[in-house]
Image: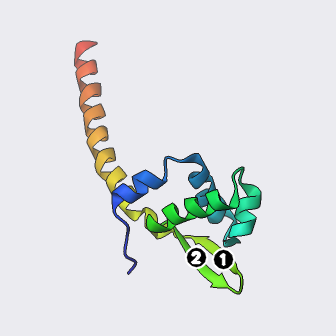
Amino acid sequence: MPVHAAPNALFTALPDPTRRAICERLSRHGEQTVHILTDRASVSLPAVSKHLGVLRRAGLVRNRREGRHTHCRAEPDGLAPLIDWMSLYGAFWRERFGRLEALLNRMDP
């Protein structure tokens, strides 16, 4: 069973558009080297490396070394704490919207 990062690490990692783009690229295209990710990003190699570090600490990316190259892959299970959090608030808002709809129906017969 994978160990998940704290939800705060996810909330810190995902607001950045470059990190989201890296996650999306790895999710869609599979494992990529850091150099390939850098070629596709609009930021420098050191910046991509820093972004990957944040994503790795958040549990969203895993690295492996092969010779002089670092290969990265998405860790979709790393999103579990975020999905759990969203499910909790999704139920909260569905209930609230249901009550609002009932109130509006009573006000406008």
Nearest the eye: 28 or 57: 57
Q: Give the residue pinned by disc 2.
A: 63
Q: Residue at x 72, y 60 (%)?
A: 38
Q: Quadrant of the N terminus?
A: bottom left
- State whether residue 107 is above or below residue 77: above
Nearest the eye: 52 or 102: 52
| Figure quadrant of residue 29 | bottom right
**Residue 70 percent across, percent down from the top left:** 66, 77
Q: Is 39 left, or right, of 19 in this rendering?
A: right
Q: Residues within 10 Å of mark 1 (few under 14, many from 20)?
A: few
In the orientation shown, which residue stands out farthest toward the bottom?
Answer: 67
- State whether residue 85 is above or below residue 90: below
Q: Residue at x 26, y 34 (%)?
A: 96
Query: Tag 1: residue type?
Result: Thr
Q: Where residue 106 is drawn, which disc sits there?
A: none
**Residue 83 percent across, percent down from the top left:** 39, 57
- State whether residue 4 is above or below residue 8: below
Q: Is 3 left, or right, of 69 in this rendering?
A: left
Q: For the residues marked 1 and 2, what is the alpha-carbon distance in whole angstroms?
A: 6 Å
Query: Tag 2: residue type?
Result: Asn
Q: Give the residue pinned by disc 1.
A: 70
Q: Residue at x 44, y 62 (%)?
A: 79
* First-in-chain label (1 vs 2): 2
| Cβ atoms under marks 1 and 2 closer than 8 Å | yes
Q: Quadrant of the C terminus?
A: top left
Q: Residues within 10 Å of mark 2 (few under 14, many from 20)?
A: some
